[in-house]
Image (tube, rainbow, N blue to C red):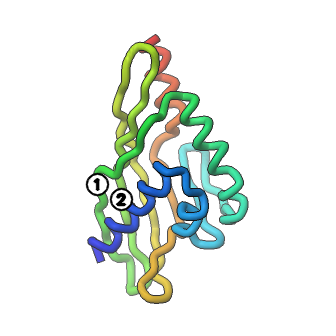
């Protein structure tokens, strides 16, 4: 299953880098929970799909040029759910250069029909926009 989970997140990386909104959406359950430094909220996939292009444009305007899967650590929770701790390597550029930022996220995935995986909970461990702004302010 570790290889299957790794491939799942490589799929996510490819969909994200090509801005394939429907492929990104296909990785999430119809309703999922999103948690971050500002709390937790339930998100409907249809609403999420509408926001993805705006989020990508926002981070692109902040200098995000690339996101790559760095590591995936998988732990089964039971026969249906598993926990995946993921590190994404994000590359940012501005007029003074570029920087790599490691973004840490934890996902709970559910196994569906034919072992298909879906994200039912995503926890981002930092506010990426704040990390980028801090870097930009010190590298102008």
Q: Which residue is mark 1?
A: 71
Residue at x 42%, y 52% (from the top left corner): 105
In the depicted structure, whether residue 139 falls above or below residue 37: above
| Residue at the front extreme, as displayed | 18
Which quadrant of the view contains residue 106?
A: bottom left
Q: Dot 1: what SS?
A: strand
Residue designated by label 2: 85
Q: Secondary structure at mark 2?
A: strand
- For disc 1, the neighbor class at 10 Å (few under 14, some 14 to 19, many from 20) is some
Q: Is residue 65 left or right of residue 57?
A: left
10 Å crowding of disc 2: few (<14), some (14-19), many (20+): some
Above or below, 60 relative to 34: above
Q: Nearer the viewer, residue 45 or 122?
A: 45
Instruction: Tell me: 66 left or right of 19.
Output: left
| x and y percentages locating residue 55 in the rendered image | 62, 43
How far apart marks 2 and 1 lie (CA) works out to 8 Å
x%, y% of residue 24? 54, 61
């Amino acid at each position: 299953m570790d290889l299957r989970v790794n491939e799942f997140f490589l799929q996510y990386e490819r969909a994200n880098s090509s801005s394939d909104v429907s492929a990104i959406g296909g990785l999430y359950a119809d309703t999922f929970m999103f948690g971050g430094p500002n709390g937790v909220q339930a998100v409907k996939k249809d609403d999420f799909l509408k926001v993805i292009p705006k989020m990508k444009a926002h981070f692109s305007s902040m200098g995000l040029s690339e996101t790559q899967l760095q590591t995936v650590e998988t732990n089964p929770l039971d026969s249906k759910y598993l926990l995946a701790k993921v590190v994404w390597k994000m590359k940012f550029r501005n007029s003074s250069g570029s920087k790599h930022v490691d973004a840490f996220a934890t996902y709970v995935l559910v196994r569906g029909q034919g072992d298909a995986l879906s994200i039912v909970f995503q926890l981002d461990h930092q506010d990426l926009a704040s990390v980028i702004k801090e870097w930009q302010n010190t590298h102008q």
